[in-house]
Image (cartoon, rainbow, N blue to C red):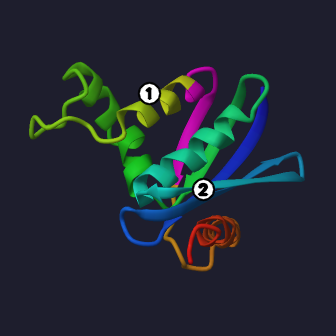
Amino acid sequence: MKKVNIYSDGACSGNPGPGGYGVILEYNGKEAELSGGEENTTNNRMELMGVIIGLEALKQPCEVTVTTDSKYVTDAFNKGWLVSWQKKNWKKSDGKPVLNLELWQRLLKAASIHNVTFIHVLGHNGHHYNERCDKLAVRERDKFSS
């Protein structure tokens, strides 16, 4: 299996408000940048979209390391939230519906063909790829700002 690194970040001005995501795929020393945004969204949605777009860009099953500053994304996988939510028919521990359900389902589908590891890094803390992804996300977000 190919080993691919996906670095991702989301940005939002207001919550909700204009937002963007930035993704860098790295394989065998080569990189590809992906980015996009929405006029009215949330930070969590953009964090999810970055990871989704990165995984959906892969053309075959890979061993993937996803690095993001989003605890929302990493904890959902690493702390078993997704498993629990699914067992409870997409309800959180407080009984309320899981937000962004369609994106979580899309992310699970995109991740299902890969062996994915999720790593959390602190945002705005000098991590080279996280900083680059942030710049991509902010650039996309700012396309919607007045």
Magenta segment: does it hold 111? yes
Residue 21 appears at what percent x and percent y? 60, 57
Q: Which mark is residue 37?
A: 2
Q: Is residue 144 above or below residue 73?
A: below
Residue 78 appears at what percent x and percent y? 40, 42
Q: Is residue 126 above or below residue 95?
A: below
User: Is residue 117 or residue 17 the one in the foreground?
Assistant: 17
Residue shown at 57% from the left, 29% from the top: 111
How many other residues sit within 10 Å of disc 1, few (<14), some (14-19) or many (≥20)?
few
Q: Which mark is residue 105?
A: 1
Q: Nearer the viewer, mark 2 or mark 1?
A: 2
Residue 11 appears at what percent x and percent y? 52, 66
Residue shown at 37% from the left, 62% from the top: 16
Image-quadrant location for residue 81: top left
Marked residue nearer the N-terminal end (2 or 1)? 2
- Magenta stretch, residue numbers: 110-119
